[in-house]
Image: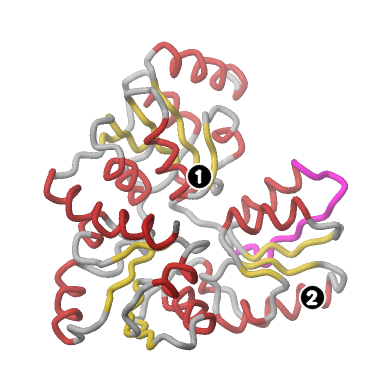
Amino acid sequence: MNIREIQDRIIKLKKENDICILAHSYVGKDIREVADYTGDSYKLSVLAKEVTQKTVLMCGVRFMAETVKILSPEKRVLLSNGSAGCPMAEQMSKDFIESVKKEYPDYTVVAYVNTTALLKTVCDVCVTSSSAVKIVKNIENKNIIFIPDCNLGAYVAEKCPEKNIKLLNGGCPIHANIPYADVQAMKKAHPEAKLLVHPECLPAVSAAADYVGSTAGILDYARKSDAKEFIIGTEISIAEQLAYEFPDKHFYPLSSKLICPDMKATTLIDVYNAVRGLGGEEIILDDEVIRKARVCIDEMIRLGG
């Protein structure tokens, strides 16, 4: 079979088997083309609550599928490729954060949505990269522990000087691996280009950007901007996606190293096998984990509304 034939079979099978396919923006174009919805992790999780299908297939990484299950426990949730994890989400254990909370009992623990379901059970509020600043500003407590991404946390701290924000040593190894020297080189090569970066990048990289924001924010900025050239400082697939959408504009990845192997682990064949009942991993969470993890997500919705 060629790619088009596999895609056609997936589209047919997902309808027959009452499956909604969600694809993160970082997965391959061939997968995004068969998805019902694409976007960032939180957007997809919220959409999953609204769809009528009883089974949701997540094309992304494990914490995203877990978040879907937390918000839609009545649905059957599948992860297309069970090996697709997230190094940042798995950096900090529940026991470790519980020990940190004992050391800093008067601090509110703010967890990036890129965390495991188990870790969310001991956190006070969740945030996304697009909502983090607004939510932290709306938290009554001045003292904040921000986990796990210290680069996103540093960005939030800069925007919220009135808060006392404690950062722990964690983050996205892909975004954090891009040095400021790469910014200098790309700006020299493309002096007219706008630099758009994700706040998971190093503070020096973010400080040099024309725009700092979530994946969805970067896409939105590039779509609305009158500029013709952009340097994209997030996963390389976003530059590719924008190039397809706007062939009259030029999009340059900030670095060829901005490739997430976990996001690339999911293949079109994985999706095909999942929709025909021969693949994918069902996400099973204890009722207590769902209940406790839901608390910090509900708080995110309250403070970010």
Describe residue 60's horizontal placement relative to residue 291 as left or right.
right
Q: Give the residue drawn at x 37%, y 15%.
A: 17
Magenta highlight: main SS: loop
Q: Give the residue drawn at x 69%, y 66%.
A: 196
Q: Magenta stretch: give its range.
A: 245-257
User: How far apart in space, not on screen, are marks 1 and 2 (Cα)?
Assistant: 28 Å
Describe residue 149's horizontal placement relative to residue 218 as left or right.
left
Front label number (1 vs 2): 1
Q: Is disc 1 surrounded by few (<14), some (14 to 19) or many (20+) residues within 10 Å?
A: many
What count of labels does the image hold?
2
* Residue 55 falls in image quadrant: top left
Quarter the C terminus occupies: bottom left
Q: From the viewer's perspective, is residue 220 above or below residue 207?
A: above
* Residue 108 falls in image quadrant: bottom left
Picture coordinates of residue 200 (x, y %)? 51, 70
Q: Nearer the viewer, residue 200 or 2?
A: 200
* Residue 126 falls in image quadrant: bottom left
Picture coordinates of residue 161 (x, y %)? 49, 87
Picture coordinates of residue 235 (x, y %)? 58, 58
Q: Give the residue drawn at x 16%, y 51%.
A: 289
Q: From the viewer's perspective, is residue 37 above or below residue 151?
A: above
| Disc 1 to disc 2: CB gap under 8 Å | no
Look at the numbered disc 2 and give the secondary structure of its residue: helix
Would residue 247 be counted in the magenta stretch?
yes
* Lower sequence index among marks 1 and 2: 1
The amino acid pointed to by label 2 is Lys
Q: Name the residue under label 2.
A: 187
Q: From the viewer's perspective, is residue 284 above or below residue 272?
A: below
Q: Name the residue under label 1.
A: 24
